[in-house]
Amino acid sequence: MSDTGSGMSAETLAHVFEPYFSTKDPSRGTGLGLATVHGIVEQSGGFIEVESELGRGTRFAVFLPAVGGAPRRDTPTPANRVSTPSSSETILLVEDDPSLRKALVRLLGREGYEVLAAADGAEAEVLAVDGRRIHLLLTDVVLPGSSGADVAEALLRRRPGLPVIFMSAHFDDSRAGHALLSVAPLIAKPFAPDDLLTEIRRALDTPSRTRRDDR
């Protein structure tokens, strides 16, 4: 992937994958998108190459092992990883960071999940009323226009018992301000892919009296 934008200096390039590092105004991002993508790619046995020059743009190249290839020796599967069942389950993903959203779609798809991806609450609402089954909501807490808690609350009115997992770069602050945030699982960004997958599996495997498959 490449662009013809302003590019990066050698000093900026050296920090590009560090959590919370960003050259943007704080209101335009947390600086976690590339850090999380980098973690997901490495966890998958791949790597990322970056080339950039001021005034000439930036190029990112993502390298991943071929399907069926042998796993890297330095990326063992954690002992607490919960296996994914063979049956397909659908996750509604709401994440406004494009790079992180794409990386999560790839990660979850590779694990056998069907993913409906939305950039904000409005897109999530459209996907939710489309008649498709949704087994879990995975949403960022801070979204354009509405919060992840608002999205979850609206969805739970129509789908009682739907498992919800929140993601946030501001773990402590995210627990305040909404009742759902105090009871639903919240995973702090940046997170390891296996930590997210384990949390998803745990949420899906937890029985709910009000959950119905036909919702």
Image (cartoon, grey):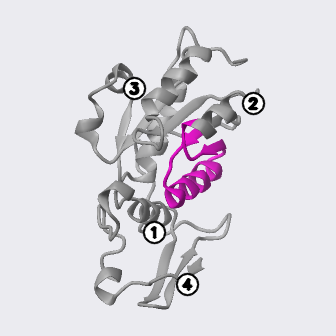
Element at label 4: loop
The reply to whether callout 4 and callout 2 are in contact (CB within 8 Å) is no
Q: Could you tell me which residue is drawn at 42 percent across and 62 percent down?
A: 39
Q: Residues within 10 Å of mark 1 (few under 14, many from 20)?
A: few
Q: CA distance from mark 4 to mark 2?
A: 37 Å
Q: CA distance from mark 3 to mark 4?
A: 42 Å
**Which residue lies under the disc numbered 4?**
4
Q: Which is nearer the eye, 178 or 5?
A: 5
Magenta-drawn stretch contains 95: yes
Mark 1 or mark 3, earlier in chain: 1
Q: Which residues are magenta?
A: 92-121
Mark 3 or mark 4, earlier in chain: 4
Dividing the picture into quarters, in which one does residue 52 lie?
bottom left
Dividing the picture into quarters, in which one does residue 98 lie?
bottom right
Query: Depth-wise, is mark 3 or mark 2 nearer the camera?
Result: 2
Magenta-drawn stretch contains 44: no
Q: Position of residue 192 (x, y in %)?
A: 39, 53
In the rendered view, does 35 fall on the left or right side of 120?
left
Q: Is residue 81 visible?
A: no
Q: Position of residue 119 (x, y in %)?
A: 56, 47
Mark 1 or mark 2, earlier in chain: 1
**Which residue lies under the disc numbered 1?**
73
**Which residue lies under the disc numbered 2?**
130
Element at label 2: loop
Q: Which residue is the extreme one toward the right?
A: 131
Question: Residue 184 has which mark?
Answer: 3
Q: Residues within 10 Å of mark 2 (few under 14, many from 20)?
A: few
Residue type at tag 3: Ala
Q: Could you tell me which residue is drawn at 36 percent across and 35 percent down?
A: 186
Dividing the picture into quarters, in which one does residue 147 lie?
top left
Q: Position of residue 97 (x, y in %)?
A: 49, 55
